[in-house]
Image (tube, helix red, strand yellow):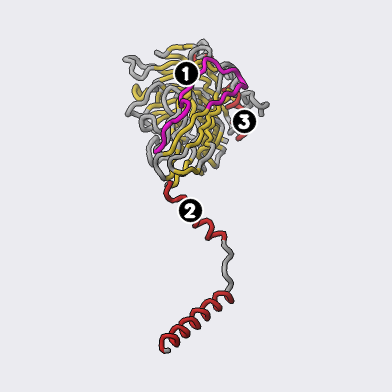
Amino acid sequence: MIVTVALSGAASGEITREGLVAEYHFDIDASDSSGFKNDGVIRGGRIDDAYGGSLSLNHFSEHDEYVNVSHSESLNLSRTMTLEVIVNWGSTTDEKFGIVGKGDYSSQSGWALGMPDGGTKLRFYPSGGFDEISPFIEAPSDIPNRWVHYSVTYDGFELKMYIDGAIAKSVEYIGKISTNDQPITIGKWYDNYNANRFDGDITEVRIYNRSLSDIEIQNNHESFLANHPRITVTKTIESSYIAEGNQTNVKINFVNIGSTDAKNVRITDKIPDGCYIVNGTATKIYPNLSPSTSEEFQYSIKATTSGKFRTPIAEITYQDIKGNQYFANSNTQIISVFAKQNEEDAELQQSSKDLPKATGFENILSIIGLIVGTILRKKSTKI
């Protein structure tokens, strides 16, 4: 998961540097490469080579694991700011846990980004409180063991949250960011609160003293994709309106839009309700998929039950050259299956729809004809 929080340009695909006051790659240690010398100290965690360098933290360790960055005035941002962090949590718990924050639990001051409910929602608090009645913005979190890019921006009037460079939520908030003399903590809620620790990997933490624009958020997202594979998957249905007992083809197309090879690519699709496979397979494995390379396979399904069905998503897993795991999902499609015995009825109904509509005058003539016919029948009966 990648997280960007912006409270207020670089070229496309390049990291925005303007306004940067803290930057942590976690490639060797927790040193700050922004130029402001806001170096951090790793306490208990370790550095590994995931995502080009990351901080690995274990929520279940008996020792406290997090990073501490001492307070400085360059980190006290009262009106606008930007926070970025790439996160890949290894598990979720029934507790809240922090990702990055500058605050104090006892005084309820500062800002914080984390999971308040055990990993189902990502939430950012701009002004302390850290509860349901305090100002916040949130978006659904993602599954464990997946890198995702989250962003939140604040410009003094509006909080925005992005997922993978695209806006997911916005809320109005007019006020200041809560300031204090507390350190920044990475990997749990607060420096003086030895609980609610993060489990997984964190890297590329960035803090800005201004609000990044939508384009800058997107550019940063594109830069995160550099030196990594990224596969997108598209599912299409050849004929989405078929009769019961007939079949149609399902096509799965995927392309590596990243900059490095994707290894051990495995695609698994699921058959929609009311159907079964009659030709081909819904699972494929590819040893390697190079950048800008696409592949496609298809299989045939037969409909056994009438109704309207939504196809499940096709799931894909793959690795980079270091063995880091990635996930992606396809879109879904709708298949409408009509009963076989109703084909003639459907044709008749369609034919009746195609007939020209009678005018008002023609309707009057029809009524007169019915009346005259009735009178003649009565006279013939009397004779």
Task: Specify the amino acid type for callout 1.
Answer: Gln
Q: Is residue 30 magenta?
A: no
Q: Nearer the viewer, residue 248 or 152?
A: 248
Residue range (magenta): 274-297
Q: Secondary structure at mark 2?
A: helix
Q: CA distance from mark 1 to mark 3?
A: 27 Å
Please name the residue that numbered disc 1 is placed on. 325
**Depicted 44 relative to depicted 138: above or below:** above
Task: Specify the amino acid type for callout 2.
Answer: Ala
Pick out the residue farthest to the front: 383
Please name the residue that numbered disc 3 is placed on. 216
**Depicted 272 relative to depicted 63: above or below:** below
Closer to the N terminus: mark 3 or mark 2?
3
Q: Secondary structure at mark 1?
A: strand
Q: Position of residue 156 (x, y in %)?
A: 55, 39
Residue 346: numbered disc = 2
Residue 57: numbered disc = none
Closer to the N terminus: mark 1 or mark 2?
1
Q: Quadrant of the C terminus?
A: bottom left
Measuring 62% from the left and 30% from the top, which residue is drawn there?
216
Does the rendering let one see residue 100? Answer: no
- In the image: residue 353, left or right of residue 63: right
Assign the magenta stretch its main secondary structure: strand
**Depicted 90 relative to depicted 210: above or below:** above
Q: Position of residue 18 (x, y in %)?
A: 63, 26
Quarter holding residue 182: top left
Quarter holding residue 61: top left
Pick out the residue farthest to the right: 11
- In the image: residue 92, left or right of residue 19: left
Task: Specify the amino acid type for callout 3.
Answer: Glu
